[in-house]
Image: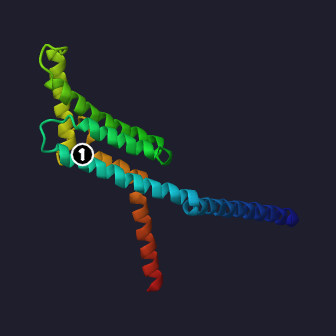
Amino acid sequence: MPAVGAMFAAIFQLVRDDAAHGRKKEILLKEQHYSLAASSHMANVVFDKQVEFSDKYISEVLKAFHTLMPKRDWEEAHAFAKNLTFIRLEYMCWLTTEIDENLEEFEKKLRTLGSNSSYIKMPKGKGTNQEHRDEAAREMLEIQAAFLYILEKTEKHPEVKLSSLSKKMRNMLNVEELTTLKNKLVDNSLQSNS
């Protein structure tokens, strides 16, 4: 009987050691994948391109914001939408599908502003329908309000709000995660130095 107990103990020890080895191996693989992903040339290039894209895109958005804010005529919004689309297309290889689609929605709203601004200025009766013109004017005012009034909370057209756009850009660049990681590294460094 003692031999059977010793054999079970030995088997149990082998199973436990094997499980511990499996966990260590899994952790090591995860660390290697993380290290490879974080330090690979391609990962660095993608991140650099996304930062470059974000700078250009946000610069054009702010230019649109400052140019359009004081104006009553928003036909120029169409040109800004075109510029933003060209910037996005220039960097299309470096953007995720989600970011690409989200920004396309933003650009579409700017195009709508420009188109509706042109449409409601057309003389009445020349290929226009008053009910359709009223709807275009209402939609234009809603989009303008969402774009211009940064501090107001509005449920309509959230994709055109600057705060929403800013959040999408921060997510694309993982700003929150990188800041948290940097703070942890600084804290760990300070603790090890004390």
- The quarter of the rendered structure image containing the N terminus is bottom right
| Quadrant assignment for the C terminus | bottom left
Above or below for 128 versus 49: above
- Please name the amino acid that badge 1 sits on: Ala
Total labels: the figure holds 1
Residue 178 picture location, percent across and down: 43, 62
What secondary structure is marked by label 1?
Answer: helix
Displayed quadrant of residue 76: top left
Tell me residue 153's x, y (percent).
Answer: 19, 43
User: Image check: 190 left or right of 153?
Assistant: right
Residue 163 shows up from this direction: no
Circle 1: is it few (<14), some (14-19), or many (20+) Cα within 10 Å? some
Give me the residue at 80% from left, 61% from top: 11
Q: Nearer the viewer, residue 56 or 11?
A: 56
Which residue is label 1 attached to?
64
- Percent x, y for residue 33? 61, 59
| Residue at screen point 19% across, 46% down | 67
Q: Tell whether 137 sits left or right of 178.
A: left
Residue 161, quarter of picture: top left
**Scheme of image coloration:** rainbow
Q: Which residue is drawn at 19% across and 24% down?
A: 119
**Residue 149 position (above or below residue 39):** above
Residue 120 location (% of width, % of height): 16, 25
User: 170 or 63, which is in the foreground?
Assistant: 63
Measured along the vertical axis of the image, is residue 43 above or below residue 76?
below
